[in-house]
């Protein structure tokens, strides 16, 4: 492992968070035709944290690299990462979405091959809310992990990292030696906006693509899960404003709740 920080940031292309997802007619996914896609917000936070580490600890950072696993259009979010200041990017091109375990296996292969010593990634993707890719990646690598990070501090020699985690009812601070997997929570930072001029500069940058058959021939990415159906939550009846306790008791009796 490098004595300097070699940071990998996985990023996912998801339906934009401002769009309300609708279940498709087949009930096996959501409608995507004509919809805007963006970088997963939690991954954007991981990108921002990598950039801040690169700025604040420049002498201790070897490189920052963003990787996406998905369709060809993922190049858009990777160019956005370059425009923000990430050193390099790559795309593992797949025709179909992969489940978290398969993604973790592909990332583990890249980490081992490129000898990264820090993986910064969003704690979850807003499309499936699995919240387990980082944990499985750490297990496959046999690395320590610090999830739901809201503060990240490396020691002076960048051999260990202190992470403050969001937990139910408060915060928890943990410390671990590198190499390390860190998953980011919303309070960690506020991602920067990227100017149009910077986006134009990277518009024609060729994104390196990694073929599954050529670069990952021995990685088993077969699905272990089957999606039976996807359904929208049942609508709830509208609320009722009551004038007094007597009216509340009457309504509860009518509903046979008391």
Image: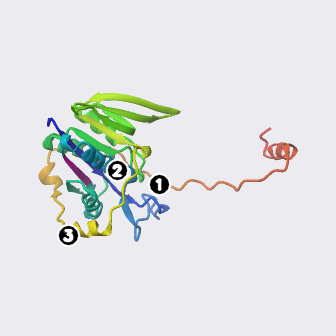
Residue 46 lies, in percent from the top left, at: 33, 47
Name which residue lies at 46% across and 32% down: 171
In this rendered view, identify the residue nearer to me: 101 or 110.
110
Name which residue lies at 26% across and 54% down: 68
Q: Which residues are magenta?
A: 63-68
Above or below — where is 162 with respect to 58? above
- Reading the chain from its start, which is encountered first: label 3 or label 2? 2
Q: Helix, strand, or loop for circle 3?
A: loop
- Reading the chain from its start, which is encountered first: label 3 or label 1? 3
Kindly identify which residue carries mark 1: 230
Residue 94 lies, in percent from the top left, at: 24, 57
Q: How is the image coloured?
A: rainbow
In this rendered view, identify the residue nearer to me: 4 or 112.
4
Name which residue lies at 27% across and 66% down: 198
Above or below — where is 199 with respect to 131? below
In the shown orientation, is residue 19 left or right of residue 99?
right
Kindly identify which residue carries mark 2: 43
Where the C terminus falls, by quadrant? Answer: top right
Of helix, strand and loop, which mostly describes the magenta segment?
strand
In the shown orientation, is residue 78 left or right of residue 2?
right
Q: CA distance from mark 3 to mark 1?
A: 38 Å
Residue 226 lies, in percent from the top left, at: 37, 48
The answer to whether marks 3 and 1 mark residues whose Cβ atoms lie closer than 8 Å is: no
Kindly identify which residue carries mark 3: 204
């Amino acid at each position: 492992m490098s004595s300097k920080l070699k940071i990998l940031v996985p990023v996912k292309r998801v339906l934009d968070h401002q769009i309300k997802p609708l279940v498709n007619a087949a009930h096996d996914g959501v409608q995507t035709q004509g919809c805007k896609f963006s970088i997963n917000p939690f991954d954007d936070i991981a990108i921002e944290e990598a950039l801040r580490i690169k700025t604040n600890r420049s002498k201790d950072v070897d490189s920052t690299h963003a990787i996406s696993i998905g369709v060809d259009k993922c190049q858009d979010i990777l160019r956005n990462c370059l425009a923000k200041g990430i050193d390099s990017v790559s795309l593992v091109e797949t025709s179909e979405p992969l489940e978290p375990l398969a993604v973790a296996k592909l990332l583990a292969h890249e980490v081992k091959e490129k000898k990264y010593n820090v993986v910064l990634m969003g704690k979850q993707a807003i499309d499936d809310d699995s919240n387990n890719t980082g944990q499985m990646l750490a297990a496959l690598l046999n690395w320590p992990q610090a999830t739901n990070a809201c503060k990240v501090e490396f020691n002076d020699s960048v051999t260990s990292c202190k992470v403050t985690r969001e937990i139910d009812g408060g915060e928890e601070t943990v410390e671990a030696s590198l190499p390390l997997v860190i998953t980011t929570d919303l309070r960690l930072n506020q991602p920067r906006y990227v100017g149009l001029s910077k986006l134009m500069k990277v518009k024609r940058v060729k994104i390196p693509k990694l073929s599954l058959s050529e670069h990952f021939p021995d990685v088993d990415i077969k699905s272990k899960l089957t999606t039976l159906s996807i359904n929208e939550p049942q609508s709830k009846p509208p609320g009722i404003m009551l004038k007094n306790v007597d009216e509340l008791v009457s309504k509860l009796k009518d509903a046979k709740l008391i």
